[in-house]
């Protein structure tokens, strides 16, 4: 990658991998000396809940 702070275009066009949250949590529980940025991002993802819902802000969708 030219600039590691930006994702290359192909990273967003190659598709996705469906990974059970439980498996990701098990992987992240393995003790490490230092957590990488990618691992930290995955840790945040395991704590996020998704709910499809309309959000109204100032009476607009």
Image (cartoon, rainbow, N blue to C red):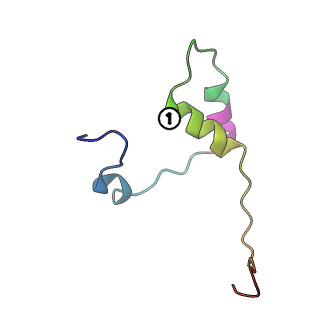
State whether the magenta stretch is mostly helix, strand or loop.
helix
Image-quadrant location for residue 33: top right
Work out which quarter of the rendered image holds the N terminus and state it. Answer: top left
Image-quadrant location for residue 59: bottom right
Secondary structure under tag 1 reads helix
Image-quadrant location for residue 14: bottom left
Side of 14 where 43 appears, left or right: right
| Residue furthest bottom in the image | 59
What's the residue at 28%, 41% (across, down)? 3
| Residue furthest left in the image | 2
Is 60 or 47 nearer to us in this picture?
60
Work out which quarter of the rendered image holds the C terminus and state it. Answer: bottom right
Residue 60's x, y, as percent? 70, 87
Q: Is residue 27 magenta?
A: no
Q: Which residue is mark 1?
A: 38
| Residue furthest front in the image | 58
What's the residue at 75%, 80% (across, down)? 56
Residue 17's x, y, as percent? 48, 50
Tell me: residue 24, above or below residue 29: below
What's the residue at 72%, 44% (across, down)? 47
Tally of numbered discs: 1
Numbered range of the magenta stretch:
20-25
Mark 1 crowd level (few <14, some 14–19, many ≥20, 10 Å Cα): few
Tell me: residue 49, above or below residue 41: below
Tell me: residue 53, above or below residue 20: below
What's the residue at 64%, 15% (across, down)? 31
Residue 50's x, y, as percent? 71, 60
Side of 42 where 10 appears, left or right: left
Q: Is residue 21 magenta?
A: yes
């Amino acid at each position: 990658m030219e600039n590691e702070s930006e994702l290359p275009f192909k990273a967003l066009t190659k598709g996705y991998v469906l990974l059970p949250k439980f498996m990701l949590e098990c992987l992240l529980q393995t003790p490490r000396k230092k957590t990488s940025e990618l691992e930290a991002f995955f840790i945040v993802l395991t704590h996020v809940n998704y709910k499809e819902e309309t959000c109204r802000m100032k009476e607009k969708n």
